Image (cartoon, coloured by chain):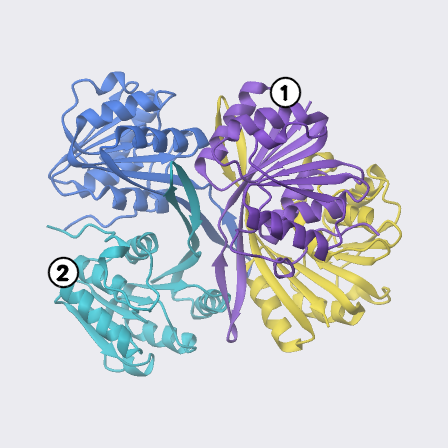
Chain colours: A yellow, B purple, C blue, D cyan
């Protein structure tokens, strides 16, 4: 049976590392349009929540998760084991350096850049097959603007960007309160 | 090959009937957690964009789309044909009346209620199997509050609600402008 | 000199009681259209941040702040003293009971209702002069929907409602992160 | 009597030129903290809605509105006349060129830049008195990021930025629909 998107947040093993929330994970993966045999590279993989769902979608392909915090790599491995995602490999290291020697990819997800965003985007471009998707999720003004600006310059991508703002509704007695999650920008770039 | 969520808006045939936007469609269907052999009922199906994607997900199951506008039913049929969703049936009529005699369902989607929301929810409850999902999308205060209130009373459902606000980023010369879509509330109810 | 709206949040003395954020305070008070000699009643006044700014606007009028938590009343008094708002009176008690005997008002602000919203709205209506403004701020679905529904029934008010969602931008190293505040609904009702 | 912020949108004379919506106008002017004798320069004044309200606040001061579209200048003059803002002067021309020879200012509002944002910010800085406020409203990613980046470099300003997203609630029969306005970023910079 094929994977159904949207594992609830509380099913992932989490440390102190920030985790992509369910709704953003769903939209990011849907925009990545992951096929069953795809090769996916997830840069700044954090707890691995995106990597795990990507691996379940690409069940005949593989996912390579790059994370520079050892605590993160441990979480990714723990989550991969929990969800039986044995096609998920976690690599400790900083992009873009650690991207050398990675295979050609159908999808590159960029969730963290450690200040090397433009180099990572250039490196991701080299790894991406024609028709491949590069999906950047941005929680800062600088990542949003630098990604849009870079994509205008390289001009090999068709770009579609949006901001997602989720407000969760929490029961509070017999009432329901509005609780905002932080907005996230998703920049989806398809290589021509 | 399994369907990948998120057909772009402009690929659907559209009339003057409002269409669920891609990001909301993706989240609604992900929260509906549609399985490959599921039976899905889509009430107030509009252009059929949700129904079509549901039918592609439930490719060994079936989708029944209910719509009270003849123009809508024509659009649903045209979109079903365009995307080869031959497991999608469109029914002209108003819920809840037209729900009599429908089969037991794994998923009921409620996108429009024509003023009969509470009756539709009660009727949907009868059709839903244990473990089934009832997903209401609300664009009015009244649909949001009546759905939450009804779910508190019937108490057979676990309920999870959120508001999704999407801002699309449009190129304008060398700039990128923020353009808001209307917010939509998604109330996802799982029958115990 | 007349008061300029928008005292920064961190200038108020705060306890553990939730405080209306600056942007919401500004919009609430602007929509209340407070005149220099107005009588203002603030129900569920919390820390008194709204009451204090209202009192500085209505410097030849008066503000009566109602709060049922003794800790809140202490904060209101402390903030009134800090900002020299000597036309601000804090009353300990629960609305609508404590509203008996209050003077006719130009403006009634409702920020908390302790489960007695409809009774408070009815009582506020009796206290309001013709042309007076009743401003409800809602952080729950139920307050929003009950206020809109009540206003449709009494029909003596023209109603204008909106949701305000503020995202603050925080410096983080050389970057700027998006941090959402919770959305608030403001229902502004003008008595005909 | 002092001006009360927040003239309803439909009271302004409007052409095809985009107008700052009431809620954004209120917040922009509150963050500008306009005093009764202030000199205010409004760059890219559009229909003049901000300029008019600024002029009513600075009733013993003056407002200079700069607009490069003749249609806009006509609207500014018409709105100034309608609201009796005789301390408001409209100048036809493009900033920063037309800013030469303007008086020292307490407040500079930047609502449009015609591609010359950084030059305008530098020029505004020269015109601003110590303690003066420079308020940029941004509807594009580029204006937002360039303003934040410029302010980091010049370092004479304390900066506070936020995004305002207003959703209006419209009656539709006996229901109330959510209708989003486009989000606007407000970058408020106070000169040390």
Residue placed most toward the observer, B173 or C6:
B173
In this rendering, which labeled residue sits more in front, label 2 or label 1?
1
Where the C terminus of chain B falls, by quadrant? top right
SS for tag 1? Answer: loop
Image side of residue D174 versus residue A160, left or right:
left
Q: Position of residue C33 (x, y in %)?
A: 21, 44
User: Where's residue D87, x and y in %?
Assistant: 14, 67
Q: Which residue is mark 2?
A: D59
Asked if residue C43 lies left or right of residue B41, the reply is left
Q: Quadrant of residue B168?
A: bottom right
Give the left or right position of residue B11, taking residue B59 as reference. left
Res. B18 in view: yes
B116 shown above or below B60: above
The answer for which chain carries disc 2 is D
- The answer to whether the residue labelled 2 contacts the one labelled 1, judged by CB atoms less than 8 Å apart, is no
Q: Residue at x 56, y 24 (%)?
A: B151
> What is the secondary structure assignment of the residue under circle 2?
loop
Residue at 26% over, 28% down: C154
Q: Which mark is residue B156?
A: 1
Task: Answer above or below: position of D26 versus C112.
Answer: below
Q: Residue at x 80, y 64 (%)?
A: A99
Q: Which residue appears at 52% of the width and 27% of the height?
A: B118
Nearest the viewer among B131 and A90 is B131
Given the image, what chain letter belongs to the residue carrying mark 1? B
Report, in whole angstroms, how far the alpha carbon at label 2 lies from the one at label 1: 62 Å
* Residue D116 picture quarter: bottom left
Taking depth in this image into account, of C191 and D159 the one nearest to the observer is: C191
Residue D135 screen position, x and y as percent:
34, 63
Q: What is the crowding at mark 1: few (fewer than 14 residues within 10 Å), some, or many (at least 20)?
A: some
Residue B165 to residue D134: above or below: above
Q: Residue A33: x, y in percent?
A: 74, 56
Judge the density around disc 2: few (<14), some (14-19), many (≥20) Cα neighbours within 10 Å.
many
């Amino acid at each position: 049976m094929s994977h159904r998107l949207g594992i609830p947040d509380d099913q992932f093993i989490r440390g102190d590392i920030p985790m992509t929330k369910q709704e953003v994970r769903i939209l990011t993966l849907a925009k990545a349009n992951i096929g069953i045999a795809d090769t996916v590279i997830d840069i700044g993989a954090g707890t691995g929540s995106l990597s795990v769902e990507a691996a379940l979608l690409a069940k005949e392909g593989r996912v390579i998760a790059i994370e520079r915090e050892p605590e993160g790599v441990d979480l990714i491995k723990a989550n991969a084991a929990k969800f039986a995602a044995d096609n998920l490999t976690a690599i400790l290291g900083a992009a873009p350096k650690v991207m050398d020697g990675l295979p050609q990819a159908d999808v590159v997800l960029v969730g963290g850049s450690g200040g090397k965003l433009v180099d990572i985007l250039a490196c991701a471009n080299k790894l991406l097959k024609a028709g491949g998707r590069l999906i950047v999720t941005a929680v800062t003004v600088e990542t949003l603007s630098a990604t849009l600006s870079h994509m205008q310059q390289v001009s090999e991508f068709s770009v579609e960007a949006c901001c997602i703002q989720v407000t969760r509704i929490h029961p509070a007695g017999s009432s329901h309160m509005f609780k905002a999650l932080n907005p996230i920008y998703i920049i989806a770039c398809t290589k021509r």
